[in-house]
Image: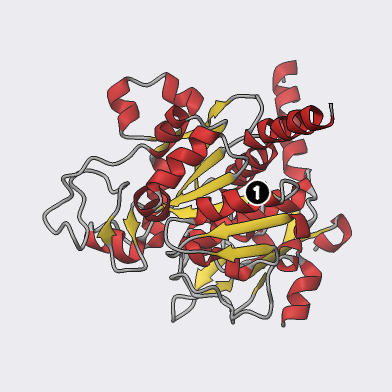
Amino acid sequence: MHTELREKHEIYDYLRHSKKFPVMWCAGCGIGIVLGAIIRAIDRMGLDRDRVAMVSGIGCTGRMPVYVDFNTMHTTHGRALAFATGLKLARPDMYVLVVMGDGDALAIGGNHFIHAARRNMDLTAIVVNNNIYGMTGGQYSPTTPLHMRATTAPYGNIEPPFPLCELAKAAGASFVARSTVYHATELDRLIEQAIARRGFSVVEAVSYCHTTYGRLNRLGAAVDMMRWLKENSVTLAQAEKMSPEERETKIVRGILLDREGPGYVDLYDEIIRQAKAAENG
Amino acid sequence: MPDEEVALQEKTTEKKTKRRPRGEVRLFGKWCKGCGLCIAFCPQGVFEANGEGRPVVAHPEKCTACDWCVVHCPDFAIQVRRLDDQEGKG
């Protein structure tokens, strides 16, 4: 069956067929859709897969690199960006993609996240935001909206969520974009631009967890949550026409920040060049 | 008949006869978990649920090769082959 699949469609070229399929995520989970978007972006850019590295931490999203035939690194919880920083500095020729969940990126790895952005480290961070810790049983995460339920917030969450994209912008990232798993083709275009941009690029892929978050908050099955994403997200142009109160309730999609300029690797190379010149001169 | 109406009629007949792209859908049962996204969202209604809630290609002739299901299947269990004009006939 695997050979049959491989012959037909490019996405199967990038899967590690020695691994156990189907993928381990719950039926209908958006993480598989994000993985598909990443593969399409890389395929379209024509990158040599030996020069692509996918780094992850722990959690549902942390399982993503298992299935793809790139250089992959499955690291400790929240530290994916730290490992990726080391990798990028040792091998600046690599395209380093860091896939994280919301808890991995903003709670356990929150410090790494803001400092990778501050350094403008040449990494592409793809954060799959499903508003909860899915794998460990539905504890609230730093992106769980106010008053929504989690197993650790049975009467509703009283902690305001982190606005992931605003955080990345303020901390110094070069490229910040957001889309949803319903808008999967938009997502792959954004990932493509994020990979191409120098400096720290962040793509927030808004997904859902119907198994824990959806069940605890009575939001329905995968199909219902997917429909919710479709009906409650707007493009930047649509958002501009809305009142601030209305905009608050929507997921705004598109490129939220795109600034050109050198990334960390460019500045580091420059320092090496200067130091060598001083030594030789 | 006024000219405008004639023009309009011609336009609509042209629209009707213009061939839409066609596609051939294949499902991989071993990878499919039956989440139902394809059944719910296919713009042409190609899929229907069987007794177990899993998708079957109930209306293959309706497929326009838009690839919605291919892009959104979280389990990579759907493929659509775009048919060329000759294959699409009949």
Location of residue B89 with respect to A18 vertically, above or below: above
Can residue A161 be seen at all in this image of the molecule? yes
Q: Residue at x 68, y 73 (%)?
A: A16
Visual colour scheme: secondary structure
Q: Residue at x 69, y 77 (%)?
A: A17
Q: As drawn, which residue projects farthest toward the right?
A: B86
Dot 1: within a 10 Å radius of its alpha carbon, few (fewer than 14), some, or many (20 or more) residues? many
Can residue B2 be seen at all in this image of the molecule? no
Q: Chain of mark 1?
A: A
Would you say A171 lies left or right of B74 here? left
Snapshot quadrant of residue B86: bottom right
Along the line of sight, the residue nearer the viewer: B25 or A15: A15
Would you say B20 lies left or right of B32 here? right
Q: Residue at x 49, y 27 (%)?
A: A236
Looking at the rendered structure, the kind of residue marked 1 is Lys
Percent position of residue A155, x then y: 11, 55
Circle 1 SS class: helix
Residue at mark 1: A88
Percent position of residue A136, x then y: 32, 68
Percent position of residue A159, x then y: 20, 44
- Give the mark count: 1
Would you say A162 lies left or right of A87 here? left
Snapshot quadrant of residue A277: top right
Would you say A108 lies left or right of A94 here? left
Snapshot quadrant of residue A209: bottom left
Q: Residue at x 65, y 48 (%)?
A: A88
Along the line of sight, the residue nearer the viewer: A262 or A255: A262
Q: As drawn, which residue projects farthest toward the left?
A: A155
Considering the image in quadrants, where does the N terminus of chain A appear?
A: bottom right
Location of residue B84 with respect to A119 vertically, above or below: below
Along the line of sight, the residue nearer the viewer: A48 or A268: A268
Percent position of residue A222, x then y: 40, 61
